[in-house]
Image: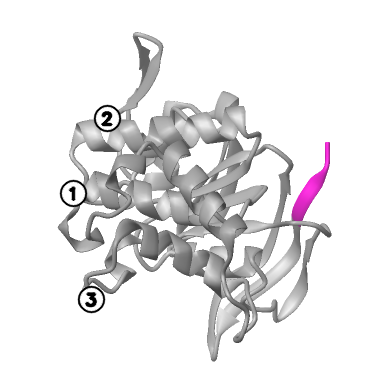
Amino acid sequence: MIKMVEFKNAILGYGRKEVFNRLSLDIYENDFLGVVGPNGSGKTTFLKAIMGLIKPRGGEVTRIGGIKFGYCMQRQFIDTLFPFTVFDIVMMARSSTKGAFKRLGREDREKVSESLDIAGISHLTKSAFRDLSGGQKQRVLIARALSLEPNFLILDEPTTDLDVKGEREILELITSLHRNKRLTVVLVSHELNEVINCSDKFLFLNSKLPHQIVMKDDLNEHMLSEIFGVKMEFKKVNGRYIIT
């Protein structure tokens, strides 16, 4: 197995605030890592460290050569003041990889169109992004990340504020990309039920407890109850895991 990213006793933080103390974690090619924790537990810090946007204060964070990240940001961070079309939003990602004076060409437009098709929203190409539903906007941001032709996909709270149907559809799309495109995936969420059925290992974050890295096969009620500080039930119903 090819190791894509390695955290080795990494110490991460900002200013005087230390967020992680000696984090050790390996992310391998075609992994699907679910990062679960409440707001303020370090999820964003972890993502920035993966992509090299912050450097460790101690220890090491190393990345294999040839990684191409596709980052799917939270929907609320997209400016909807201007009437950008779906095509515009996705094309902006391609623009960010070009030099300041390089024009976008036919290949860029083809990659955008291909990404929209994969995300199942090619029919929305000319629609205004701000007029879309939450689920449609999320598909646009996934297409935006895919337009960069990544081999490592990072998704930050992709199901926030979606209804049950929209949440399920987005997770099915992400799972399909992982399986069919063989993408390495890191999916951040504050809800374990959102990622339990698609991730194969988990990083549990809690500002009051040490972080924990757990494979799905090792999950059990006692462990989850300790991590989250409340009594939890963990069962499988009709082939799906349910946590209550």
In front here: 204 or 103? 103
| Mark 1: amino acid | Ser
Q: CA distance from mark 3 to mark 2?
A: 42 Å
Quarter placement of the N terminus: top right
Q: Earlier in the sequence, mark 3 or mark 1?
A: 3
Q: Are marks 3 and 1 in contact (CB under 8 Å)?
A: no
Q: Are marks 3 and 2 in contact (CB under 8 Å)?
A: no
Relative to 90, residue 223 above or below? above
Quarter occupied by residue 225:
top left
- x 58%, y 24%: residue: 217
Q: Which residues are magenta?
A: 1-5
| Mark 3: amino acid | Phe
Residue 82, disc? 3
Q: CA distance from mark 1 to mark 2?
A: 28 Å
Give residue 180's position: percent from left, percent from top. Answer: 60, 28
User: 10 Å neighbourhood of mark 3: few (<14), some, or many (≥20)?
Assistant: few
Relative to 194, residue 39 above or below? below
Q: Is disc 2 placed on a helix, strand or loop?
A: loop
Left or right: 238 as drawn, with respect to 14? left
Q: Mark 2 highlights which residue? A: 244
Q: Mark 1 highlights which residue? A: 133
In front here: 153 or 14? 153
Is any part of residue 165 visible from this angle?
Answer: yes
User: 10 Å neighbourhood of mark 1: few (<14), some, or many (≥20)?
Assistant: few
Q: Is residue 3 magenta?
A: yes
Q: CA distance from mark 3 to mark 1?
A: 17 Å
Give residue 154's position: percent from left, percent from top. Answer: 54, 54
